[in-house]
């Protein structure tokens, strides 16, 4: 389509009937003329001239046209109407607007008809018209040169014709003259046709009046959001254009109010299928709350109304992928169960199930895995039983060497067939235990807790002691049942496998406090002048100097692990909160506000906290680079001593790297970044050390001897 302001006359131009509205309908724009411009050897074109009432401002108008010789109100299955929307900037600047367009070369037609179907005023009001409202105004055909009329039959018949032919021509002309009876009959037919045309005009006017009444009533009800009444009026009157308008406005209103089901009802009641697709697409985008991740059941019910199975399956997979990315596999499996094709549904459900187990077990989300497995019986289309799913989870834990997971499932489902035969120990600082500390730690036996807390290496200045297969040789003799060891400048403290402890002075020192006999200790730690002992029942004992109240721990309960610094003590509870007592010169005991802590340790005047998300925070002294530890991520273990913090960071499920943060400016602790993955590591005074799974030592720092004296090896 193209437009021009100039109308070109041509002897090949054929003017066609123009559809006009009745005189009672005054519009700001109407079709002034329609013409076919026929050119020999070239493609035919059409020209439509629109006339404007410039006193009324228009935003746009839409006209429909077709290349057909039939009147505009007569259906033509071979030639459908095309639509053209005119909304150029010069719309309100010219009284005449000319539209030119090419006639498709495959069409052989002598006619073209068009009408304006919609006008949008600048005020926002929309005027709509239907082809049935129009009548045709005939245009004169292309004029031909005048021809002289014959005066008689004889003068028009060449004399060279035979006499018989002349006689026949004369008789034919006589017969063509009407008799009075025929003239009377013709007059009756003409009068009858005029009566019929007049009746049609009256009926058309009544129909138009009725249409406008229905439309205006519907528009009034739409403005008042009384869509149900508007729909009934439009439906009863059988006007599709009004009905579709009511439905469209209702859909817009209810989508805006997030009432998707009602919006779908009105979309479905419309003859416009695109409206239902719009509502379903909107529901797909809104089915998962972006903030909470919850399923919008209202939106999901709308999605299920689509009758296109392929589209429905595609939508289901989009929703499931979104839920899986959020870790919500239970809902993903529930949504997947709605897939209509059984084979596709079974395959996709199994995929979701396998991905769920891999996600939950790999990330130590045992409670989530349990909820997921318990939900499976409610999904009737899923083929695996509860016991099958549980066995699959145990197998995944075994495959991943996830002892914490095996412990969890064996305690959580003791009645499950065969599960009681599964046994597992724990590893020091087991990541699975830490991931859900409040749940799994209370499930551990005393022996498992002792192993979880075991620390097989301790260093101080140039002294390194480590446990190998339970054996460690100390100045006071060899111990063969050692589980953990800790050291300060005065002594070594050893935790035995039977839950007892023993103290071993260094360099001729004496033990500064009496060691009671215990049989339930699971964790030990040394401060500068005091020792802290964790019992299996979650209570704590402290021995030694109590000048600042660092040993006032008798009221503590539900403790998971303990840490001691210079004259202060910190305890971690199973709920991830902290308690602290003692010297608080730098705020090292101000730890009560913190949550989700999974491990703790202490420097001289600094509390170090490891959180469940793998980040680290410190309270107390934090200068000279010590505070940089708070930028570390993916941290799995921490050790602190003197004025340094050594952290283990996760690279892959099996690979680790180590970083050191120190607040000491008088020397060097060395660099651990090239160390391999270690079983254990510790921090001393200006030195760090660790031992790998093969028993090889890694060490660095100013206070490390040239040759490490590992007395446990002698």
Image (cartoon, grey):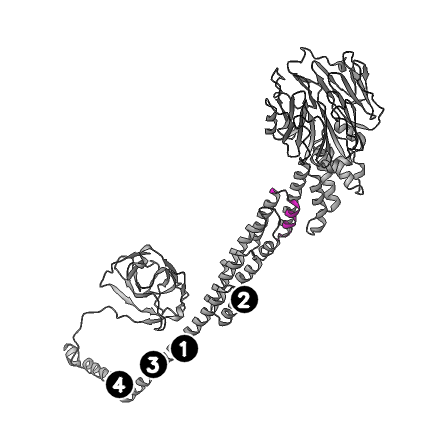
Q: Alpha-carbon neighbours of circle 4 within 10 Å: few (<14), some, or many (≥20)?
A: few
**Residue found at x 28% / y 86%:** 183
Question: Helix or strand or loop: what does disc 2 sit on?
Answer: helix
User: Label 2 belongs to which residue?
Assistant: 228
Nearer to us in this view, 385 or 463: 463
Closer to us: mark 2 or mark 4? Answer: 2
User: Label 4 belongs to which residue?
Assistant: 178
Q: Is 515 positioned to the left or the right of 268 in the image?
A: right
The answer to which quarter of the image holds residue 414 is: top right
Nearer to us in this view, 348 or 584: 584
Q: Alpha-carbon neighbours of circle 2 within 10 Å: few (<14), some, or many (≥20)?
A: some
Image location (x, y in percent) of residue 568 = 72, 26
- CA–CA distance in space, label 2 to label 3: 43 Å
Q: Is 564 positioned to the left or the right of 299 in the image?
A: right
User: Label 1 belongs to which residue?
Assistant: 203
Q: Alpha-carbon neighbours of circle 3 within 10 Å: few (<14), some, or many (≥20)?
A: few
Q: Is residue 290 visible?
A: yes
**Mark 1 in CB contact with mark 3 (< 8 angstroms):** no
User: Label 3 belongs to which residue?
Assistant: 194
**Mark 4 in CB contact with mark 3 (< 8 angstroms):** no
Mark 2 vs mark 3: which is more N-terminal?
3
Q: Is 411 located above or below residue 56 in the figure? A: above
Closer to us: mark 2 or mark 1? Answer: 2
């Amino acid at each position: 389509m193209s437009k021009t302001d100039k109308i070109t006359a041509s002897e090949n131009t054929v003017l066609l009937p123009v559809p006009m509205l009745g005189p009672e309908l005054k519009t700001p724009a109407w079709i002034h003329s329609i013409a076919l411009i026929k050119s020999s050897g070239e493609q035919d074109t059409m020209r439509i001239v629109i006339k404007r009432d410039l006193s009324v401002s228009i935003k746009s108008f839409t006209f429909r046209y077709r290349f057909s010789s039939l009147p505009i109100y007569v259906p033509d299955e071979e030639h459908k109407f095309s639509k053209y929307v005119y909304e150029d900037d010069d719309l309100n600047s010219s009284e005449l607007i000319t539209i030119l367009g090419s006639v498709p070369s495959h069409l052989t037609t002598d006619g073209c008809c068009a009408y304006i179907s919609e006008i949008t005023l600048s005020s926002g009001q929309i005027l709509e018209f239907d082809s049935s409202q129009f009548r045709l105004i005939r245009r004169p055909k292309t004029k031909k040169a005048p021809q002289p009329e014959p005066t008689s039959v004889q003068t028009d018949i060449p004399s060279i014709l035979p006499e018989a032919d002349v006689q026949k021509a004369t008789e034919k002309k006589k017969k063509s003259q009407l008799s009075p009876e025929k003239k009377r009959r013709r007059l009756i037919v003409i009068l009858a046709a005029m009566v019929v045309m007049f009746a049609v005009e009256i009926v058309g006017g009544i129909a138009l009046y009725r249409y406008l009444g229905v439309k205006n009533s519907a528009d009034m009800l739409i403005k008042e959001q009384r869509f149900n009444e508007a729909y009934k009026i439009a439906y009863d009157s059988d006007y599709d254009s009004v009905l579709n308008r009511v439905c469209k406005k209702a859909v817009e209103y209810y989508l805006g109010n997030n009432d998707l089901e009602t919006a779908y009802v009105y979309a479905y009641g419309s003859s416009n299928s695109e409206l239902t697709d719009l509502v379903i697409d909107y529901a797909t985008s809104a089915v998962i709350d972006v903030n909470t991740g919850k399923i919008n059941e209202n939106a999901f019910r709308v999605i299920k109304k689509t009758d296109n199975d392929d589209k429905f399956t595609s939508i289901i997979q989009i929703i499931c992928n979104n839920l899986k990315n959020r870790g919500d596999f239970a809902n993903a499996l529930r949504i997947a169960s709605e897939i209509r094709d059984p084979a596709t549904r079974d395959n996709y459900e199994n995929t979701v199930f396998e991905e769920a187990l891999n996600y939950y077990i790999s990330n130590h989300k045992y409670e989530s895995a349990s909820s997921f497995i318990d939900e499976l019986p409610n999904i009737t289309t899923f083929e695996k039983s509860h016991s099958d799913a549980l066995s699959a989870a145990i197998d995944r834990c075994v495959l991943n060497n996830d002892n914490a997971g095996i412990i969890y499932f064996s305690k959580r489902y003791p009645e499950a067939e065969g599960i009681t035969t599964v046994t597992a120990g724990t590893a020091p600082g087991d990541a699975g235990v830490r991931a859900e500390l409040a749940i799994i730690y209370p499930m551990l036996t005393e022996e498992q807790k002792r192993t979880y807390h075991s620390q097989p290496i301790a260093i101080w200045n140039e002294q390194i002691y480590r446990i190998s297969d339970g054996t460690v040789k100390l100045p006071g003799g060899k111990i063969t049942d050692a589980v953990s060891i800790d050291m300060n400048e005065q002594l070594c403290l050893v935790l035995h496998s039977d839950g007892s402890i023993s103290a071993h002075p260094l360099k001729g020192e004496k033990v500064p406090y009496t060691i009671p006999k215990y049989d339930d200790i699971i964790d030990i730690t040394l401060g500068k002048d005091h020792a802290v002992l964790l019992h299996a029942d979650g209570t704590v004992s402290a021995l030694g100097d109590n000048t600042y109240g660092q040993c006032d721990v008798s009221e503590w309960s539900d403790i998971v692990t303990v840490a001691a610094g210079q004259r202060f003590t910190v305890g971690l509870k199973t709920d991830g909160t902290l308690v602290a007592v003692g010297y608080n010169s730098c705020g090292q005991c101000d730890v009560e506000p913190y949550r989700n802590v999974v491990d703790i340790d202490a420097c001289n005047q600094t509390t170090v906290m490891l959180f469940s998300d793998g980040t680290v925070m410190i309270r107390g002294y934090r200068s000279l680079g010590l505070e940089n530890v708070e930028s570390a991520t993916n941290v799995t273990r921490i050790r602190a001593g003197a004025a340094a913090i050594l952290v283990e960071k996760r690279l892959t499920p099996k690979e680790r790297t180590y970083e050191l943060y120190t607040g000491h400016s008088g020397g060097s602790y060395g660099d651990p970044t090239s160390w391999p993955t270690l079983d254990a590591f510790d921090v001393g005074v200006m030195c760090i050390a660790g031992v790998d799974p093969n028993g090889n030592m890694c060490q660095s720092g100013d206070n490390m001897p040239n040759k490490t004296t590992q007395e446990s090896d002698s």
